[in-house]
Image (cartoon, grey):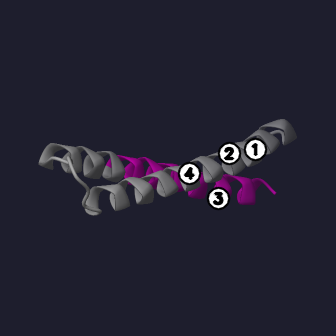
Amino acid sequence: MSKAMINDLKIKIADYKRFSFMLLSLSAFLYIGSIIPFEGKEGMDQIVLLAVSYCSIGIALFFYRKITIWKKIVKEES
């Protein structure tokens, strides 16, 4: 693997870390919004907030999985 490809992987790792952190922050925000009661919130709103929260957690976990794979590749090539 060339130096350019390794540097590209390092940049992708940093970007994916930032993006997965933002997704985890979003999921925490949506989860808190689903459990805090307020006037006019229906049951369907709560279900949608929870579903989007769980989906963003799943996507963040997928990104963390990709990060670990890429870190192994970078470590082997270094």
Q: Relative to 39, is 59 on the left or the right? A: right
For the point 71% across and 50% down, which residue is it? 14
Residue under circle 3?
72
Amino acid under label 3?
A: Lys
Asked if the magenta segment contains residue 7, the reply would be: no
Q: Which of marks 4 and 1 is nearer the N terminus?
A: 1
Magenta-tinted stretch: 55-78
Label 4 sits on residue: 22
- In front of the other: label 2 or label 1? 2
Queried whether the magenta region covers residue 60, the answer comes back as: yes
| 4 or 1: mark nearer the eye | 4
Pick the quarter of the image with the C terminus. Answer: bottom right
Measure how far apart labels 4 and 2 are at the Cα level.
11 Å
Which residue is under mark 1? 11
**Which is in the foreground here, disc 2 or disc 3?**
2
Neighbor class of circle 3 (other Cα within 10 Å; few <14, some 14-19, many 20+) is few
Residue type, mark 2 in image: Asp
Question: On the rendered structure, is 2 left or right of 73?
Answer: right
Drawn side of residue 33 relative to residue 70, left or right: left
Label 4 residue SS: helix
Pointers 3 and 1 in contact (C-beta within 8 Å)? no
Q: How far apart are marks 2 and 1 (CA)?
A: 6 Å
Q: Position of residue 37 (x, y in %)?
A: 24, 61
Give the residue pinned by disc 2: 15
Mark 2 lies on a secondary structure that is helix
